[in-house]
Amino acid sequence: MGTRLLLVEDDERIRLALGLALEDEGCEVVEAASGEEALELLSSTSVDVVLLDLMLPGVDGLEVCRTLRAQGDLPIIIVTARTDTADVITGLEAGADDYVSKPLVASELAARVRALLRRRQPGDSTGRLALRIGEIEIYPEEDVVRRAGTEVHLTRTEFRLLVELAGAAGRVVTREELLKRVWGYDYFGDTRLLDVHIRRLRRKIERDPDDPECVLTVRGRGYKACSAG
């Protein structure tokens, strides 16, 4: 069975054209013309990924994104007509896993969807039963993270990012390597996606996100996890 995707777009022409193109790429497309319709539909319908336009009438895409993220880790790709930093970062901070810019290319979008769904499948979890970063314990086979014994909820993307850093055992992992390993897609040097997810991850696992002790920035190179201790 193909991927079931919820397409939330208020422009009927775009919605119909993109829906047909995505169906040609092997996706089953469910449509919603507003944020309110999307939230109501998701209360009774199961989908694999949400493709969410930010500029919606009424309840906008950012509010829909925040609502869905508060409810769980359903994969969300936001669509923006603008590529300026503030617009993209705001959407990612709201909880999106990825973003695409208009005009959309169905084949590229389908590739993003497939890469996103691969992160939700069991993979090579470094072959270890458990990983540790300071007081953070990571159980890759169970998709569980605990800080000082208390479970911490991460999205699938945040979890994969943490596993990659912990599995590097203190070595620096470049931004490009993390983008390739976690997102599985070539972002042509656009590291905003990664940097926002690092901030989100730190807010969940660090005692003081502004003075991180677990996930450290190595300027000009990338990120590394601190030594266990």
Image (tube, rainbow, N blue to C red):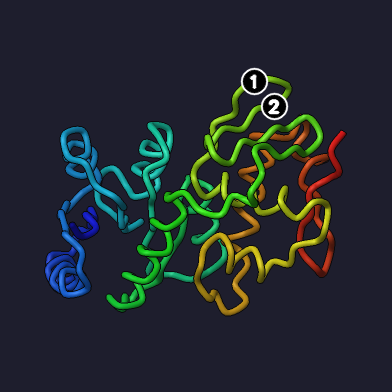
Compared to residue 125, the image places residue 173 above or below, namely: below
Residue 180, image x, y percentages: 58, 69
Name the image quarter holding residue 213: top right
Q: Which residue is mark 1?
A: 150
Left or right, residue 26 beside residue 174: left
Q: Which residue is mark 2?
A: 147
Q: Residue at x 84, y 45 (%)?
A: 226
Name the image quarter holding residue 46: top left
Left or right, residue 171 beside residue 119: right
Is residue 8 visible in the rendered structure shown here?
Answer: no
Say what amino acid the circle numbered 1 marks: Thr
Classify mark 1: residues with Cα within 10 Å, few (<14), some (14-19) or many (20+): few
Residue 165, image x, y percentages: 71, 52
Tell me the quadrant of the picture where the C terminus can be found.
top right
Disc sitting over residue 166 in the figure: none
Tell me the quadrant of the picture where the N terminus can be found.
bottom left
Report how far apart the C-alphas of labels 1 and 2 lie in the structure. Answer: 5 Å
Is residue 146 visible in the rendered structure shown here?
Answer: yes
Classify mark 2: residues with Cα within 10 Å, few (<14), some (14-19) or many (20+): some
Asked whether disc 1 touches disc 2, contact meaning CB atoms under 8 Å apart, the reply is yes
Compared to residue 31, the image places residue 18 above or below, namely: below
Compared to residue 17, the image places residue 139 above or below, namely: above
Q: Residue at x 40, y 35 (%)?
A: 72
Q: Residue at x 66, y 68 (%)?
A: 177
Say what amino acid the circle numbered 2 marks: Arg
